Amino acid sequence: MTTLRPFTFDDLFKFNNVNLDPLTETYGMSFYTQYLAKWPEYFQLAESPSGQIMGYIMGKVEGRMENWHGHVTALTVSPDYRRLGLAALLMNFLEDISEKKRAYFVDLFVRKSNEVAIKMYTNLGYIIYRTILDYYAGDQDEDAHDMRKALSRDVNKISVIPHTQPVRIGDAEVADLE
């Protein structure tokens, strides 16, 4: 049986087994603590009966007016617990919180090469809204897909009308979403 519970400061010292994945973005300690302080309701953990961390989701709510939305900053599940529906459970949790906050949509950025994640998000109802060129910096820069799912407040689904041209990270509209 899996337990969903709020992520705590103590969990920062126990979650390395989940973060050791080449497709998981790992941040500095201050980044995680900022999220815990500002958006604690968006930072949830899946825990096994033995107390092992199975996965977590970290997000926030941001934007203004019709751009008010939930954002998935990180979602990861330990390799030992994949293909059990934990990612969907964590995503549903974040979507429910975003609905309660009256958000118009939920968005996330995913590496264009991460086909497994893109398929999972598509199966959860997300669409590729646009491509952001060179979003992920590193030895080889990589594009990201900005994926979105409209929530009930976006009755006309305006937030998920896809862009036809890729954008750059410096573009004003992209900067507003970070």
Image (spheres, helix red, strand yellow):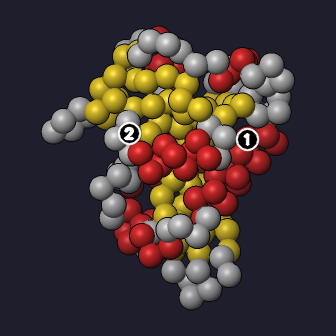
Q: Amino acid at mark 2?
A: Arg
**Which residue matches tag 2?**
111
* Circle 1 crowding by C-alpha within 10 Å: few under 14, some 14–19, many from 20: many
Separation of disc 2 and disc 1 at Cα? 23 Å
**Relative to 92, does residue 102 appear above or below in the rendering?**
above
User: Which sits in the foreground, 58 or 117?
Assistant: 117
Q: Residue at x 69, y 26 (%)?
A: 68
Q: Is residue 34 visible?
A: no
Between disc 2 and disc 1, whose residue precedes?
A: 1
Q: How many marks?
A: 2
Q: SS of the residue at dot 2?
A: strand
Q: Quadrant of residue 142?
A: top left
Which dot marks residue 60? Answer: none
**Which residue matches tag 1?**
98
The location of residue 101, given as percent across then percent down, is 78, 38
Q: SS of the residue at dot 1?
A: helix
